[in-house]
Amino acid sequence: MLPAVALVSAGALAYEVLLTRLFSIVQWHHSAYMIISIALLGYGASGAFLALAGEALRRHLGAAFAAGAALFAVSAVLSFAVAERLPFNPLAVIWEPRQLLFLPILYGLFALPFFDQFNTSLRLNPANAAFGQVVTSAQLNYARRVQIMLKYIF
């Protein structure tokens, strides 16, 4: 189960980096920094949930882990697909106050995958979850270096 925890943690970090890059392209680039607070919101909500339902989840650990990992995979794709259909325009917030109503919806949609990931990974083994995120950071750093080298070669 420990390699699975590392993979789910790595997936969550990769999803966070992906959202940061997508926000900087699709939304206004200042919104990209919002991803950190969204991830922390999901982790915090998950911690509150675990404090309330920890014993019930502990009794069914294997099923809870499988369900959380599956929910992370599904919610990561669906939350972004639904969020893209919202007519949120950050540049129009000043002129259209109704744009502010879409912001909590976006936060909830994007925080959902981090809620699912934290539920499965950090609860089971914090050291292994951290290992998965360190490995992903190293891979992303290496991929960026290769991309820069190829850019200058070709």
Image: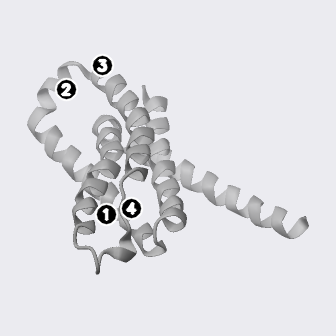
Q: Which residue is mark 2?
A: 57
Determine the secondary structure under disc 4: helix
Quadrant of image for the C terminus = bottom right
Estimate the x, y position of residue 118 in percent, counting from the top left: 31, 43
Q: Amino acid at mark 4?
A: Ile
Determine the secondary structure under disc 3: helix
Does the rendering let one see residue 128? no
Structural crowding at the residue carrying mark 1, measured as other residues with C-alpha within 10 Å and reported as few (<14), some (14–19) or many (≥20): few
Estimate the x, y position of residue 15 in percent, counting from the top left: 48, 49
Viewer-side residue, 116 vs 124: 116
Quadrant of image for the N terminus = top left
Q: Which residue is mark 4?
A: 35
- The tag on residue 85 is none
Q: Earlier in the sequence, mark 3 or mark 1?
A: 1
Identify the residue shown where x is 32% and y is 58%. 38
Q: Point out the frontmost of discs 2 and 1.
A: 1
Determine the secondary structure under disc 1: helix
- The tag on residue 37 is 1
Viewer-side residue, 142 vs 127: 142
Q: Which residue is mark 3?
A: 63
Q: Is residue 37 above or below residue 117?
A: below
Q: Earlier in the sequence, mark 2 or mark 3?
A: 2
Q: Amino acid at mark 1?
A: Ser
Q: Earlier in the sequence, mark 2 or mark 4?
A: 4
Spatial CA distance of label 2 from label 3 is 9 Å
Viewer-side residue, 122 vs 84: 84
Dots 1, 4 in contact, CB < 8 A: yes
